[in-house]
Amino acid sequence: MASAAEQLASNLNFSAFAKAEELKKRIWFTLGALLVYRFGTYIPLPGINPEALAQAFGNVQTGIVGLFNMFSGGAVERMAIFALGIMPYISASIIIQLMTSVVPSLEQLKKEGEQGRKKINQYTRFGTVILATFQAYGISVGLEAGSNIVIDPGWFFRIATVITLVGGTMFLMWLGEQITSRGIGNGISLIIFAGIVAGLPSAIASTLELGRQGALATPIIMAVVVLSVIVIGVIVFMERAQRRLLIQYPRRQQGNKMFEGNTSFLPLKLNTAGVIPPIFASSLLLVPATVASFQGTEATGGMAWLTTVTALLGHGQPAYMVLYAALIIFFCFFYTAIVFNPSETADNLKKHGGFIPGIRPGERTAQYIDHVLTRITVVGAIYITLICLLPEFLISATGVPFYFGGTSLLIVVSVTMDTVSQIQGHLLAHQYEGLVKKSKLRGKRR
């Protein structure tokens, strides 16, 4: 077995990639789907005055609106058909997952396997339509409240805007599902990743321009570069960190043969939730600012409280820091509890005769795994919170573009690592199939 694994690893090279036709098709499909997404971020809504929109966005591009614009790949500042992005779908997913923990009928659906998951996904889609409709209508009203942004205000514009934006969100949801099933990586994460990466060149150029004009000192720019490299290194290290629990299997007899007991490990990732907590937290922070996103201070009328909320949720504001950190920590524990069930893991170990040395199989093993998982999740939650918030202090103090924030780096690095791992998995599977075919041919020749 060891020699086969060594041979498999030695054959994993560029020539193997050239022969993996299925993998190449998946990669090309993923790139084509992301290209369609990027093209859609440049198709503007009908009836919008681009110059007035650019001026209005320039007044509110900081804070939560800048976050919204980053996740949508710049579609907000262009008010494109994908301006809502994928955030309504993520918000609906949060709501449905929360409800599965408190609503018995949904909890039962979750336990029914594939059929139950399909029903839950259907409920998530319905929730996405409702949230997207609400947010799209808020944006249409906000655009009309701006100065000469809408060429012909009225119900026709509002209805057309709602249909267009909701349709754009549903298309992105479908596109993400297609990438997940027919491409490489998680489709929703890759769509957010593509939006962030698309804005990096302009963010770097604007930072260098600020340095050339003297608005930013050269040491500050260098400090930002060094900080980004350090943050990337920390993310790579922490995302690969694991707590491995030793699992032992006793000797067993099968027929007339006696098989020696062996050992293995149960790997528990330090950050089991991945990039989900900051994405979920960001999506919830976007909700109260939806209606007020493009309303000027003199045109808010009865919506002045939304403008106040938007101001409080600006970068560097205490309310933003505290709420963002609290939501990240909550979703670290919540999502970990959803994706990893200690009781189910303990039952599977017991069925296969495995046990943790010094721990009784069954309930005691589940309690031990839950205890270890809780402790490492505390470390993982602190790590993600620091990664997402520490650069915010630098952004608030220096005015460096938001793309250098910890959240964007965490998403970019984590999604890249996950996609590369999936590509390596497909290559290993292709190589393994090739070795199996060769061994069968040799057997036939003999």
Image: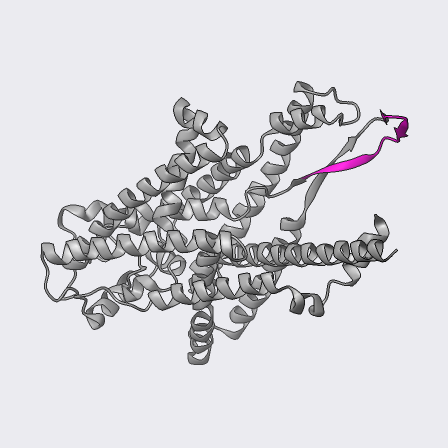
Q: Residue at x 90, y 26 (%)?
A: 256
In which quadrant is the C terminus drawn?
A: bottom right
Query: Relative to 39, is 256 above or below?
Result: above
Coordinates of residue 98 in the picture (x, y in percent):
41, 32
Query: Can see residue 298?
Result: no
- For the record, the magenta segment spans 254-267
Q: Residue furthest bottom?
A: 212
Please check the rendered image and state whether residue 266 is part of the magenta-colored stretch, yes or no: yes
Coordinates of residue 416 in the picture (x, y in percent):
57, 59
Total marks drawn?
0
Helix, strand or loop for the magenta stretch, by majority: strand
- Which of the pair 209/272 is nearer the observer? 272
Q: Residue at x 79, y 26 (%)?
A: 357
User: How is the protein colored in the picture?
Assistant: one colour
Query: Relative to 48, is 7 above or below?
Result: above
Q: Residue furthest front?
A: 445
Asked which quadrant contains residue 215, the reply is bottom left
Left or right of 6, for residue 393: left
Asked which quadrant contains residue 381, the reply is top right
Please check the rendered image and state whether residue 181 is part of the magenta-colored stretch, yes or no: no
Coordinates of residue 274 in the picture (x, y in percent):
55, 46
- Which of the pair 335/423 is nearer the observer? 423
Query: Can see residue 433?
Result: yes
Q: Residue at x 47, y 47 (%)?
A: 278
Q: Residue at x 52, y 59 (%)?
A: 412
Asked which quadrant contains residue 426, the reply is bottom right
Coordinates of residue 216 in the picture (x, y in percent):
45, 72
- Which of the pair 230/345 is nearer the observer? 345
